[in-house]
Image (cartoon, coloured by chain):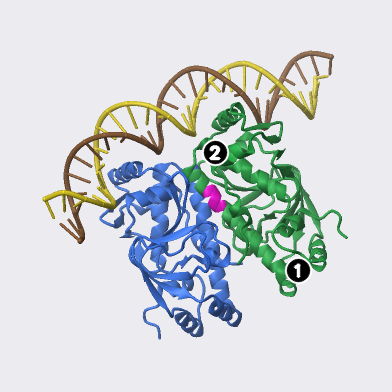
Chain colours: A blue, B green, C yellow, D brown
Amino acid sequence: MHKQRSPFARKLASFMDLSEPDLSVLAQLHSRRKSFDVGAGMVHQGQPDQQAYVLADGWAFSYRLLPNGGRQVIDFQVPGDFLGLSSVLFRSAGQCVEPVTAVQATLLDPSHLLAVFSANPSLRTAVLWAAARDEAMVVEHLVSIGRRNAVERTAHLLLELGARLSLVGLGSKAGYDCPVSQYLLADALGLSAVHVNRVLRVLREDKLLTFRNGRVVLQDFDGLVALSNFDREYLDHGLK
Amino acid sequence: MHKQRSPFARKLASFMDLSEPDLSVLAQLHSRRKSFDVGAGMVHQGQPDQQAYVLADGWAFSYRLLPNGGRQVIDFQVPGDFLGLSSVLFRSAGQCVEPVTAVQATLLDPSHLLAVFSANPSLRTAVLWAAARDEAMVVEHLVSIGRRNAVERTAHLLLELGARLSLVGLGSKAGYDCPVSQYLLADALGLSAVHVNRVLRVLREDKLLTFRNGRVVLQDFDGLVALSNFDREYLDHGLK
DNA sequence: CGGTTCATTGAAGCTCATCAAACCCCGTGG
DNA sequence: CCACGGGGTTTGATGAGCTTCAATGAACCG
């Protein structure tokens, strides 16, 4: 029995049934572990022979740099998430990945992965689902930045992260640990760090949430959902 | 000989060699044609049994509606592009697709498609590539809306559309026909229609481009590329 | 300790949204 | 043939939302 499943297995199990054999295959995939410290790039743009990982512990973020010094973070990765999947499949699309905190990741061996897929269709489906979910999240961020104001956008992102962390047992409707700095949050939200700070103050003053000392407390979950029009459907839409 | 290839075949051929057999298989895929008029939804959110198409003629756009009446267009589809692919593979992620102009689309039969894939790996690769490219474009739009100002963003999008149309023989560095209204453009750029109009005026006054009567004229291609930091790499990154 | 990173707040100003009005083109119907 | 209406474009005026610059404080660390 696997008393403590990996976050990856927990995530997959949350939307489809995984048999005992499936789970042990998953456990085998988690063979080689690698650690990364803050500041050490995990995936760089333009470099060949990238690796793909599943995040086991800690947070990371994927981003694009602009020539004018700007940075747009595409998404955060939390335990159980893929990391650098598209960089392995395709010639780099110019995305980078870096740790937010010190990170533990398990290497995905592409050839091993393919072998597992052909032997185990339900795992292939699960991985496809995870990839589709990643894309849905990017679309949601696009909608957020394009058509929601700073407060709605911030609330929406913090709710999304809470929902994702809850799936792997690292959060609840009450809150979660969030090691992201306000600067990083700003680059994810398409805002300035100063304005993020003011937005967080508004949310705090309205007794909706607090963001302090690396911890997000969702004081008024329903209020936040209403404010930001958060609909978690895009996080758990299944394959057909 | 296929003197006039479909836009889809032209697009795929632009990044990989397709043999004569490949091309004839592609031609077979283009079996049933359907027409859509402006205002007729092609893909709706939340409806089961959606179809997927390849756009043969005309323009379409995919978008998300917000409860407060806002609309964010995710991407435009031009001839040769997939349409509703993710709606077929997954339970609706809440995206809709509508024609911009009257549209001709060829139906993709999912089971037929799968049969073609297993018989013809290079076509499977090609389609995977096209899907990956779609995702890369969404990421690029996210970067644009998040970290480029209105002028850069507008120039960037119009350059992207020019590059995509050039691939299928519908545009060049000089310009292309663009049936998009300024309202629709605004919803793609995360701007108001009024401001898009002013941005277009700036671009015109700076002799960079004109957008008039459904035609985009790129007067200063290099200037636009420099202004918007347009790097077409994301449009033709290949599979590994 | 001085140095660094992050959080916080104020002040000033720019970008962009909103409201409003006029205009154009084009199709439709009296 | 002209009046009318509707969608799209264009322009002005006003102000909200957000950025930028600047400065200060708190926490951490070699």
Compute the Cα span from label 1 to label 2: 45 Å
The region drawn magenta spans B138-142
Amino acid tagged 1: His
Q: Which quarter of the figure is the N terminus of chain B placed in?
A: bottom right
Identify which residue, A201 or B168, lies in the foreground: B168
Q: Which quarter of the figure is the C terminus of chain B placed in?
A: bottom right
**Which residue is located at x 86 percent, y 55 percent?**
B3
Identify which residue, B74 or A12, lies in the foreground: B74
Whether residue B80 is visible here, answered yes or no, is yes
Dot 1 crowding, Cα within 10 Å, few <14, some 14–19, many 20+: few
Q: Looking at the picture, how far across and down is residue B196, in whole percent?
A: 57, 33
Q: Earlier in the sequence, mark 1 or mark 2?
A: 1
**Which residue is located at x 52 percent, y 66 percent?**
A85
As helix, strand or loop, the secondary structure at mark 2 comes to helix
Residue behind mark 1: B112
The quadrant in which residue D23 appears is top left
Amino acid tagged 2: Leu
As helix, strand or loop, the secondary structure at mark 1 comes to helix
Q: Looking at the picture, how far across and down is residue B74, in whole percent?
A: 58, 48
**Which residue is located at x 75 percent, y 68 percent?**
B112
Residue behind mark 2: B227
- State the residue lying farthest toward the right: B1
Q: Looking at the picture, how far across and down is residue A14, in whole percent?
A: 46, 71
